[in-house]
Image: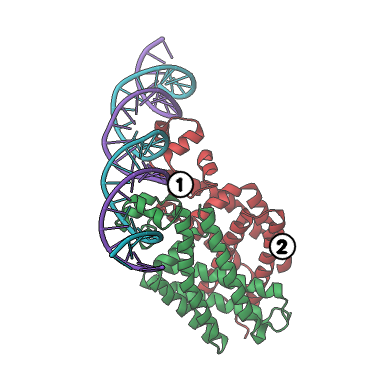
Chain colours: A green, B red, C cyan, D purple
Amino acid sequence: MDAALQLLEHQSFSSLGMREVTREAGMSPAGFYRHFRDLADLGVALVEEALDSLHAMVRAAFAEQGDPEELIDHAVQVIADHVREHRAHVRFIARERFGGVRPVREAIDAELARFTDEVAAALAAQPVSAKWSPEDIRMVAQLYVDHMVLTAAALQEADAEGERRIAATARRQLRLISLGRHHWMAD
Amino acid sequence: MDAALQLLEHQSFSSLGMREVTREAGMSPAGFYRHFRDLADLGVALVEEALDSLHAMVRAAFAEQGDPEELIDHAVQVIADHVREHRAHVRFIARERFGGVRPVREAIDAELARFTDEVAAALAAQPVSAKWSPEDIRMVAQLYVDHMVLTAAALQEADAEGERRIAATARRQLRLISLGRHHWMAD
DNA sequence: GATTTCAGCAAACAGTTGTTTACTCAATGG
DNA sequence: CCATTGAGTAAACAACTGTTTGCTGAAATC
């Protein structure tokens, strides 16, 4: 799996070959079948590995509490740290979310849907969304998750300066969304 | 190019072979080189083709004017129509935006940046953003463009019912962003 | 201590890949 | 009407592909 992740730095999953993978891993082609039936199988395993760490991150970011401003700063910081430490995983998820291999795409979709549920639950617990309908809460959760993935994807290919710029923009965008939430039913 | 687009329904660009393309196009392998130096070359050409039509669409969506509610409904409608008529192009852009082929990825990035500029210019002309800084306007423009691409990507793989659901969510998300914009400096 | 499972190997299979070369033949242009 | 260009071809090249088979040795289990 590490070998595959390494190779995926410069290509998409649908162009990955098993010979290529085994070569990178330093084993014989036949050895692959001891671990996976398929390349798609490997892909799904990678999705789970990649989103496990991210899962812990999201929990952490939403457990915190304080005023919205602080929360946003903290959330963006957590994302940036995560990307720095799991660059290959983040790139993989961003790249294959709409990629050419159905099972991988579906695994990512399913996992992100679970994320959205979790975020929705966290949002529902906030006083701001006291009288919100479940559909509206889920819609905001989706906005947040998409924004997080997109921000992570952008960070993953940025240098130190680009990182600051992207983080700053992300914070402002989150602030704007937060503003929208506070005025949702009020107009 | 049509042959390639056809094949890209089920795979990513980085796994496309030129023999595969020429076979689908009904010509001999060598014929490919009469039109493109590289496969990457084909990819960049596809990006331009795909984003030309989208460009016209964005202009149209922002030319309109009326109250925010109507504007949002209209914009989402325009996107849905576009996706229905250019499904393959939309899928290609969504899939390769973070795909494994550098030149293609960069062509898409450049083209989307031009979009963002155009949207930013349109936003700047609206009374709502009268006292906004250019950076803040661009940040909102980016939010809109990303949202548009994501919505189009979701629509592209949905059936008739999913289409309605996705469009409804997109409308609500845009409304929330619009709310945020109206209260940006006000608190 | 015997046996079963596990993770690996080399070799072989027929197909497929990108690219080059030398060639045709129709259309175009002066 | 003759020359040039454009778009196509077939054939050949070595290199690489996914998968199967039968084999080995070590580790774990009983």
Total of numbered circles in the picture? 2
Question: Residue D5: percent from the left, percent from the top?
Answer: 39, 27
Quarter in which the N terminus of chain A is drawn: bottom left
Q: Are marks 1 and 2 in contact (CB under 8 Å)?
A: no
Q: Quadrant of residue A91?
A: bottom left
**Vertical placement of residue A139 versus B185, above or below:** above
Camera-side residue of B142 and A73: A73
Mark 1 is on which residue type? Gly
Residue at figure coordinates x 47%, y 57% from the top left? A41
Helix, strand or loop at mark 1: helix
> Badge 1: few (under 14), some or many (20 or more) residues near its Cα, within 10 Å?
many
Whether residue B11 sits left or right of residue B186 in the image: it is left
Between C11 and A40, which is closer to the camera in this rendering?
C11
Residue topped by disc 1: B43
What's the residue type where badge 2 is placed?
A: Asp
Q: Are marks 1 and 2 on the same chain?
A: yes
Taking C11 as reference, is A95 above or below it? below
Is residue A158 in view from this perspective?
no
Instruction: Give the number of the mark in front: 1 or 2.
Output: 1
Q: Position of residue A118 (x, y in %)?
A: 59, 76
- From what the image shows, is residue A75 above or below residue A155? below
Q: Which residue does the numbered mark 2 point to in the structure image?
A: B73
Q: Position of residue C7 (x, y in %)?
A: 35, 60
Choose top left, top right, bottom left or bottom right for residue B127: bottom right
Letter of the chain that mark 2 sits on in the rendering: B
Q: CA distance from mark 1 to mark 2?
A: 33 Å
Residue, far bottom: A66
User: Toward which corner of the image does residue B69 lie, by quadrant?
Assistant: bottom right
Q: Write the residue at 50% across / 35% down.
A: B24
Residue B85 can be seen in this image:
yes
